[in-house]
Image (cartoon, helix red, strand yellow):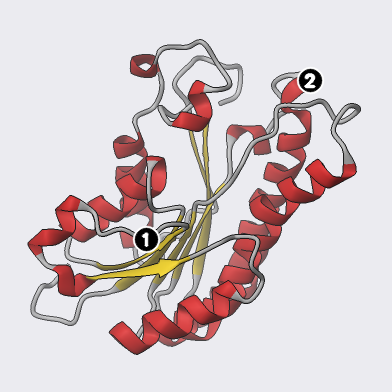
């Protein structure tokens, strides 16, 4: 990024830990201004290098009014929004038979509806950017159903991948590029609760952050619809 220009601005949900925290730190180090959506906002240690480029917002993915309030607050602070990284998500490891309606509604609300609301709230600013970027954190579970207990989660992640494609179509003529980033196991608290695979054999959040940084830095003429990342050998991914 040309540091003589005003920094580009990225909104990142679920930014307090894991993938979201790694993306925020990576973009900040590359000169971006970052607006961090967190349940309990707290300034990260790395932000001390230039706190003027960090904005905190108390974001709850279940609060339907939160996206509009967050975008308005970020625009007031920075004057623009150039990228959205919709990272916040949850997993409920149950089969499609045993999961309750309330549990499935919760999965859908956080993994599908919340990122759609964020994109809609930021849409005008992303279009004004001329090179707006949306990253939807999907999953390889949005490309195949790996096991019975990942079935309900997979349904929502298939929808999240479709959301990224739908946003790409909706914004392409306005310079908005959307990508579904689909990792396998990433060394986060969520993955640790789902597998016995040691963290050193999973994809690092920092490496995934490098991928996301690359995707949002690409020019409009190099659009990537999906990007799959895996830590283990599978037939197709």
Left or right: residue 119 versus residue 40 is: right
**Sequence order check, earlier mark of 2 and 1:** 1
**Residue 153 location (% of width, % of height):** 71, 36
Q: Nearer the viewer, mark 2 or mark 1?
A: 1
**Foreground: 88 or 154?**
88
Q: Is residue 173 visible?
A: no
Residue at x 24%, y 52% (from the top left corner): 25
Q: Is residue 82 visible?
A: yes
The answer to whether marks 2 and 1 mark residues whose Cβ atoms lie closer than 8 Å is: no
In the depicted structure, whether residue 187 falls above or below residue 216:
above
Within 10 Å of disc 1 (Cα), the crowding (few <14, some 14-19, many 20+) is some
In the depicted structure, whether residue 185 falls above or below residue 36:
above
The residues bearing labels 2 and 1 have C-alpha atoms spaced at a distance of 36 Å
Left or right: residue 174 versus residue 166 is: left
Left or right: residue 120 versus residue 113 is: left
Residue at x 16%, y 69% (from the top left corner): 51
**Residue 201 location (% of width, % of height):** 38, 15
**Foreground: 174 or 35?**
35
Q: Specify the quadrant that holds the C terminus.
A: top right
Residue at x 52%, y 31% (from the top left corner): 190
What secondary structure is found at the residue carrying circle 2?
A: helix
Q: Specify the quadrant that holds the N terminus.
A: bottom left
In the depicted structure, whether residue 196 falls above or below residue 237:
above
Number of numbered discs on residues: 2
The residue identified by callout 1 is 41
**Residue 160 location (% of width, % of height):** 66, 51
**Residue 232 location (% of width, % of height):** 48, 16
Residue at x 72%, y 46% (from the top left corner): 107
Residue 148 - label: 2
């Amino acid at each position: 990024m040309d540091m003589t220009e005003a920094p580009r601005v990225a909104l990142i949900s679920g930014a307090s830990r894991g993938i979201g925290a790694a993306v925020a730190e990576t973009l900040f180090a590359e000169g971006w201004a970052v607006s961090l959506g967190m349940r309990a906002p707290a300034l990260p240690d790395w932000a001390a290098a230039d706190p003027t480029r960090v904005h905190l917002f108390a974001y709850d993915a279940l609060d339907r009014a939160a996206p509009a309030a967050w975008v308005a607050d970020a625009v007031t602070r920075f004057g623009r929004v150039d990228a959205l990284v919709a990272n916040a998500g949850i997993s409920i490891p149950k089969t499609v038979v045993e999961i309750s309606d309330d549990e499935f509604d919760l999965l859908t609300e956080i993994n599908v509806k919340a990122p759609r609301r964020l994109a809609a709230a930021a849409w005008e600013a992303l279009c004004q950017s001329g090179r707006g970027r949306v990253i939807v954190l999907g999953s390889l579970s949005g490309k195949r159903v790996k096991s019975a207990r990942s079935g309900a989660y997979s349904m929502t992640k298939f929808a999240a991948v479709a959301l990224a494609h739908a946003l790409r179509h909706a914004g392409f003529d306005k310079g908005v590029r959307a990508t579904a980033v689909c990792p396998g196991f990433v060394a986060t608290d969520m993955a640790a609760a789902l597998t016995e695979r040691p963290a050193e054999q999973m994809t690092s959040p920092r490496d995934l952050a490098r991928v996301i940084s690359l995707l949002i830095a690409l020019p409009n003429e190099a659009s990537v619809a999906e990007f799959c990342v895996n830590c283990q050998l599978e037939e197709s991914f």
